Image (cartoon, grey):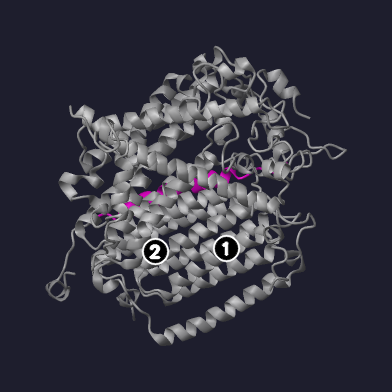
Amino acid sequence: MTIWAATDWYAFFFLLFALLACGFAAAVLFTSNIVRMAFYLTLSLGATAGLFFLAGAEFVGVMQLMIYVGGTLVLLVFGVMLTARAPFLSLRPRSGEWIVSLIAGGTLLFLLIASAFGVRNWRTASDSGPLPLAEAQTATAVGAGLTGVRVDRLNRDAAGHALSQLPHTDSGYLLPFVIVSVHLLVVLVGAAYLARAKVRRRSATESTASVEG
Amino acid sequence: MAEFLVHTLSLPAPLAYLLAALIHCGFILGLVAAGAVVFIWAERKVSGRIQDRLGPTRTGGKFGWLQSPADGIKVLAKEDLIPRAADRLLFRAAPYVSFSSSFTAYLALPFADGWVAFDTNVAVFFILAVLGLEVFGVILAGYASGSKWSLFGAMREAAQVVSYEVPLGICVVIPVLLTGTMNLTTIANMQAGWCSNWLIFHDPFTFAVFWIYATCALASVNRAPFDLAEAESELVAGFMTEYSGMRWSLFFMAEYSSMLLVSCLAVILFFGGWHGPIPVFDWLGWAYPGGASSWQLTGFLANLAGCVNFITKAVIGVTVMLWIRWTLPRLRIDQVMTMCLKYCVPLAAICFIGALWWQVAGWWSPNHWLPLRPDGPGGMRETWVVAPEAACGEVARRLPWADSAPPHGAARRTLPGCGLAGPPAGWRTGSPAAARGGVQ
Amino acid sequence: MCGLLAQITVSHYLVVGAVLFVTGVLCMATKRNALGVLMGIELLLNGANVNFVAFGSKLLRADALGLDGQLIPLFVIVLAAAEAAVALAIALNFYNNHTTVDVDKAEELKG
C-alpha cells in the first residue's frame, strides 16, 4: 500500500509519456521502412498529446490529437501509400552521412539539455507542493482569447480586484486567428491544385527503365 | 469516485486515483464487451426478422441468446494466421489501434450526472478527435495485409471516414453553440425537465441537424448504406479480408462500440442525455442539488435510473442503425463522396447559420416553454449575447490563475464519488439583470 | 536518478522537447525518402510545441506564460498542417514526374 502512496504519480505518467514520445521518435529516425515510420510517428505524437494533458493544456492536447494525428498524419500516410512502391519502401542513407549527422545531433542535444537545466527559474519547482493530476479548465479562456478577449488579463481596480468589464489592455488573438484561417484555406486549395492528377508525359527510356512493382 | 475512496476507505490519495481509474476502465471495458455481444445477437435477430426469417434460435433456448458467446469461443479457438506478404508488426498492431481509439472515446462520455471517467471541459472535442483516430487502424490493416483487396477497402474507408468528419464536426458544434459549453455533463444537465427541453426541439434547424448528424455518424462508423469498405459482394471483406480469429473480433468490437458511442453522443447532444421525457426525479426531489456535500442513496438511485434511461435511448439509436442497414441498399463510393461534399456539408453549414440566427434573434423555442432549471438553453442567450462582460467576468472567475477565482477544485466537484459537475451558483441565471448583477 | 525526478519541472519538459527537436533535425538530415524528411519536420514542430506548453503551464511554475503558452501551439499546429499539405503536394508532383521520392535523385538543377 505504501509503495502506491509513495510513488509520485505525476512523475510516473510524465516519464511514461516522455519515454513513449522520445522512444518512438528515435524509432522514426532509425527505421528505414517508410510505412513503419509513419506508424511510429503517430504513436510519438499521441504520446506528446498525453504530455500536453499532463501540463494542463487540455485544449492543445485535444487539438493535437484531432488535427495533427487525425489530420496531418492521415494525409502523410495517404502520401506514403501513394508513393510506396517496393523499391522506395526502404531507402537507406549512406553510413558516412549517419556518423556526421549523429555527431552534430548529439552536440545540439547536449547543448539544449545543458541550457534546459541551466536556468534556475526553469529547474526549480513551484512552491505549491506535489503537482495535482487534476485537469485544468482552460478551454473557455482559450476560446475567449481567440475571439479577442483576454480573460486572463482583466482590468483591475485600485484594490486589485478584477473588474468584469471587457479588458482593453490586450487585444487577444483575433487577428492571427482570422489570418491563419484564411491562410489554411488558401494553402489547402493551392495544395489540392498542385497535387492534381496530370497527364504523365514519359519518355521512351523512362518507360523501359521503370519496373512495375 | 476517487474522493469516495479517499473519504470512505481512507486510502491515500494517489492510490485512490489509481483505483478509481482502474474501476472506470473496467466498467467501460465491460460495457464495450457486453455491448458488442448483445449487438451482434441483436443484429442477427433484427436482420432475420426483416428478411422474414427467425435468426439464431438454437443456442441457449428459443431466442438463441447464447449465440454471441458461442461465436466468441469459436473465434478464440481459431488459428492465428498471418499472411506471408504481410508486414508482421503492423498487421498485429492494427486491430489494437482501432479498438483502443474506440475505447478511449468512452472515457469522456458521461452516463449520468457526474458519472464520467474524465470530466473535462473539452469532452465533445475529445470524443470527435479520438473517433477520428480509428481510421489509422483501418489504413494499417489494409496496407499490412499485403493484399490488394484489403488496400482498396482501406483506402475507400479512410477517404469516407475522413470526409464525413467535416459535416459531423459542424453538426456537433451546433449543440455546443446552443449551450455554450463543450462539457458533455453540462450540455445534458441543461436539457433537464420535460422533453420539450431537449435540444433537438430547440429550432427547426437543430431538428434538421440531428438527421444530418445521423447520416454522418452512419458514414463515420462505416455502417450501411455506407459500408462499401466491408462490402462482401465487392471486396471480399475489405480491409478485414486477411484477418481471422481474435484479431477480426477486435475489429468488430471496435465497430460496434463506435456505433454505440455515436449513438450515446447523439443522445447527450440532442435528446437530453439521462434526463427522461418526464422529470420524475425532479418531482421526487431525488436529484443531487448543486452544493450537496455527501453521498445520498436517493441521489444515487436517481443517477442509476438516469444511466438506465441513457443506455436505453442509446440502444434504441443502435437498433435504428441496425434496421437501416438491412433496409437500404449500399451506396457506391462516388455516391458516398457526393453525398458528403454536395449535400451534407452545405446543409450542415446552412443549418448552423440558421440555428445561430435563431439563438441570436431570440425567437421562441419549445425549450423556453417549460424550463425546469433557469440555466437551460433559454437562459444561455442572455449571458453570452446580451451581457458579454458578465460572461467574461464569470470565465475569469473560473480560471485557476485569476485572482478572483475560487481555490483550485473547490467549485467544481462538490460530491464524493458521483459528483455534480454543475456550474457554480449564480452562473447563467435566467434574466439579464441577474446576469449583470451576479458578478463581482 | 530519483533526485532528478523528485519534482517534475519545466526543465524536464524542455528535455523532452529537445529530444524531439534533435530527432526531427536528424530525420530531416538523413532520410532519403521525401516523406521521411516531412516526418522530421513534424517532429521538430512538436518539440517546439512541447516547449511552449511547458513554459505556459501554470501547474509547473507560478509565473508561467499562461494563455499564450497554449494559444501559440494552436497556431503552430494549424500552420504545420498547412505546410504538410503543401509539402505532400510537392512530393506527389515530384513522384508524378520522376516516379521516385528519393531526394538524392532531385538534382536536375545541379550546376
Quarter of the image where the N terminus of chain A is located: bottom right
- x, y (%) of residue B108? 53, 42
| Residue B365 visible within the image | no
Could you say which is closer to the camera, residue B218 or residue A9? A9
Is B93 left, or right, of B46 in this rendering? right
The answer for which chain carries disc 1 is A
Q: Amino acid at mark 1?
A: Leu
Tag 2 subunit:
A
Label total for image:
2
Most distant residue in the right direction: A159
Picture coordinates of residue B282, whole percent (x, y): 61, 18
What residue span does the magenta drawing correspond to? A169-197
Task: Respond whether the residues carrying marks 2 and 1 are from the same subunit.
Answer: yes
Tag 2 secondary structure: helix
State the residue in front, B362 or B155: B155
**Gap between marks 2 and 1, in whole Å?**
21 Å
Question: Residue A174 sits in which quadrant?
Answer: top right
Dot 2 crowding, Cα within 10 Å, few <14, some 14–19, many 20+ = many
Residue density around tag 1, few if under 14, some if 14–19, many if 20 or more, within 10 Å? some
Pinpoint residue B324: horizontal percent, then vertical percent.
Answer: 27, 30
Quarter of the rendering containing residue B411: top right
Residue under circle 1?
A16
Q: Amino acid at mark 2?
A: Ala
Q: Nearer the viewer, residue B432 or B212?
A: B212
Residue bearing mark 2: A38
Give residue B248's mark: none
First in sequence: mark 2 vs mark 1 = 1
Please indicate whether residue B181 sits to the left or right of residue B130 in the image: right
